[in-house]
Amino acid sequence: MPNSILLFALLCTFFIQTTFAACVKSSDKFIPVNKYYTGIEKLLAADLHKALNKLIKGHKVFKYSPCVWSILKESDVDPRNDKNVIGFYTRRSIKKSRQVSGAGGSNDWNREHIWAKSHGFKNRNQFAHTDVHHIRATDVSVNADRGNRDFANGGKVNKECPKCRMAGADTWESPDLVKGDTARMMFYMAVRYDGNDKSKTPDLVLVDTLTKVGQARFGKLCTLLAWHKRDPVSSEERLRNEVIYKWQGNRNPFIDHPEFARLIWGAKCGSNVAAAVPDDKTLILEHIDRIESELNQLRNRVMAIE
């Protein structure tokens, strides 16, 4: 082999090894959540957006396979059965062993990019492609049905996910139970990726219109803000945020501080979306059954860890 070819091969190997980490959790010093955002809590709009971007970028990046699979098996585990994961939209418990990369059966699961990868990062060397803060374990058929549709309300009931709705090839409505989860992952992506770092990912922008494949834009912003308010942060989300923090070394700010979403985008949606206040009495009453269920799940997971 000519020296030039050998050198090129070595450089490629070095690049791959240094850019995408082995499947080992981040070695960054753990920062308690009450200190993680020190100095930025009083910022507004564009200043807050910029400060959060600076805070959460530079995280550890993993290979799409096998690492993302490994992380999802921990972050999306079924709290009642550690051999299973929970499908994001259907909330169905699926055996971890039923993971598939391509087409699969009705009982299989794969990796759903909540911010569809066709909107800015189709290639695996783009950091957003492997960022687990917005990748979820999902029933294969439901993932295929959701495709790259924008998020909005309305449409026909999905056969595989009766609590999901889809309007032609345009929009997808997540079930009530994960509407807020969906929104907060989208907010994370719009803040994390601004096109100005080494992530090979363009500036991802949330808009309040329908978008097209190939655009680094996603809709609908005001719908997502409404979902964020209606479906408050759950204990399941908080626990998942901690798991991914231990792997990637960064957090989803909109789980820790729900009010950040309104401070950044609220003005664009006017009075249609009020402040997302976690202790809103109406919302607590609406979700009391969910909270009790999640507390039981959290206790089970803590006991399993101990």
Image: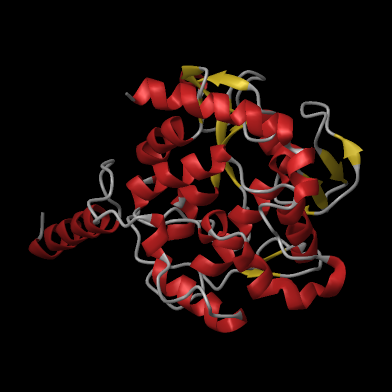
Q: State whether residue 175 appears in this view.
A: no
User: Does 168 sit above or below residue 66?
Assistant: below
Residue in view at x 51 percent, y 60 percent? 253
How many badges with numbers are in the image? 0
Please state the horizontal and vertical placement of residue 228, each as a whole percent of the image: 71, 55
Quadrant hosting residue 115? bottom right
Please state the horizontal and vertical placement of residue 149, each as a whole percent of the image: 75, 51
Q: Quadrant of the N terminus?
A: bottom left
Q: State whether residue 239 appears in this view.
A: yes
Residue in view at x 50 percent, y 73 percent? 41
Residue pushed farthest bottom? 47
Please state the horizontal and vertical placement of residue 133, each as a whole percent of the image: 50, 50
Quadrant hosting residue 208? bottom right
Q: In which quarter of the image is the C terminus?
A: top left
Task: Describe residue 158's horizontal placement relative to residue 142 as left or right.
Answer: right
Instruction: Return the residue nearer the eye: 242 or 217.
Output: 242
Please state the horizontal and vertical placement of residue 19, each as a whole percent of the image: 28, 58
Instruction: Return the residue nearer the eye: 214 or 48.
Output: 48
User: Does 125 sit above or below residue 285?
Assistant: below
Instruction: Return the residue nearer the eye: 282 or 115.
Output: 282
Residue in view at x 61 percent, y 42 percent? 234
Residue in view at x 66 percent, y 53 percent? 278
What's the coloring here? secondary structure
